[in-house]
Image (cartoon, rainbow, N blue to C red):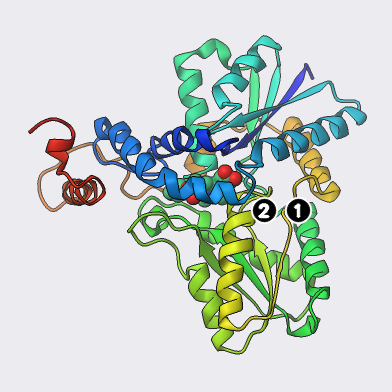
Amino acid sequence: MGRLGVLLLNLGGPEQLSDVRPFLFNLFSDPEIIRIPIAALQKPLAWLISSSRAKKSQANYEKIGGGSPLRRITEEQARALESQLRSRGEDVKVYIGMRYWHPFTEDALTQIKRDEIEQLVILPLYPQFSISTSGSSFRLIEKIWSENPQLKPPKYTVIADWYKEPGYLQAMSELICAQIDNCPNPDDAHVFFSAHGVPVSYVEEAGDPYQTEIEECTELIMRTIGRRNAYSLAYQSKVGPIEWLQPYTEDAIVELADKGVSELVVVPISFVSEHIETLEEIDIEYREIAEEAGIHTFNRVPALDTNPVFIQTLVDLVLRAAAAPSLDINRVTQMKKKIKMYPQEKWEWGLTTAAEVWNGRLAMLGFIGIVVELISGRGPLHLFGIL
Ligand SMILES: C=CC1=C(C)c2cc3[nH]c(cc4nc(cc5[nH]c(cc1n2)c(C)c5CCC(=O)O)C(CCC(=O)O)=C4C)c(C)c3C=C
Ligand SMILES: [Fe+2]
């Protein structure tokens, strides 16, 4: 084997308050995050939404010290993984490719080329696959390589998901058990998984396997724990007016309290590092909701960060992937996404799926117009200088 590279994919986060707005602009410019029916409107809409959300988002980042810890933690994970792999005799370099902030995926791929990496293992730091996370990064890599084919290493393989890995399940179980044992009545503690949500349409229309993988993951973790504690799953961090996966975390907490649950062990499930949604949303907002609802013990399970069992799992994943036949991005995406209606560009006459899609797109345009007017106080035609 020639020189091995590992590319860790992650979302990225603003490092200081002035980064928040451009970070949000990058995020909302991604059609895998917010799907604008007309591509030309993606950037103007991203600008509008990021501008209107920036203040609220900045206030939240301010509460956790003025920025996201994601870059620091991902760098620590990369260093830990690299040193473990090197101690196994591998000639390896680990890179970080963030989707929406520094260090960007584009820069990582350029550096990988410069370093003459011969075999690359692409490893998303998301245990479960979603179109909006790993899927978006895979699509970006494909785009960069198709525009600049010389950046593509001679050999590469992709790890699509890894939530079934025994080491990951073990590490999560140990962290959860420690928090169960910290409860006054450990047997009565309710294990409450909170996953980052996605819009329902991602699952029902675009075929995102995310919900299925999250559900399976919680069951596997509970089986690994092997205790009789009650458990449930809810979805957090909803953005915008459309329906996201339910139940929503804030509602589920109140419902559990109404049913008499008073000791909660809260498990962030879709991400392996501390970030704004653990440090602010769970630790501050949801804790407050729980306390008001009468829950007296709210033990949040820490993220894996550089947990040694977790890092060992990443080592095993990389070595196994490097030794196995290559999986390319298109095959992985096809395997993951059972697309029912997107993209749907070919027009057919009649009551066809294409007609439905275009009806939906036109309805969405009308809806976007209303949102633009609500946010800016001016109609879209005025706003874009058309009237
Ligand atoms: C598996 C994890 C994640 C999924 C799925 C996901 C989907 C998703 N997110 C948004 C909108 C926002 N996400 C934001 C930040 C953010 N999201 C994740 C993870 C997932 N997102 C992370 C790790 C972070 C960064 C955290 C940090 O520490 O900086 C934000 C910005 C923060 C805010 O303003 O609330 C937005 C907005 C959508 C729309 C979506 C699915 C379509
Ligand atoms: Fe998100």
Q: Quadrant of the C terminus?
A: top left
**Among the 4 quarters of the image, the one containing residue 348:** top left
Left or right of residue 298: residue 210: left
What residue is disc 2 on?
A: 163
Q: Quadrant of the N terminus?
A: top right
Q: Residue at x 40, y 56 (%)?
A: 199
Task: Please say if 225 is above or below 342.
Answer: below
What residue is disc 1 on?
A: 168
Q: Amino acid at mark 1?
A: Tyr
Task: Please say if 153 is above or below 181.
Answer: above
Q: Amino acid at mark 2?
A: Tyr
Name the one closer to the observer, 301 or 227: 301
Q: Residue at x 31, y 39 (%)?
A: 48
- 2 and 1 marks in contact (CB < 8 Å): yes
Left or right of residue 338: residue 4: right
**Among the 4 quarters of the image, the one containing residue 260:** bottom right
Taking the image as drawn, is residue 124 in sight?
A: no
Q: Is mark 1 within 8 Å of ligand 1?
A: no
Secondary structure beneath label 2: loop
Q: Position of residue 225 (x, y in %)?
A: 78, 70
Name the one closer to the observer, 385 or 212: 385
Q: Residue at x 84, y 50 (%)?
A: 309
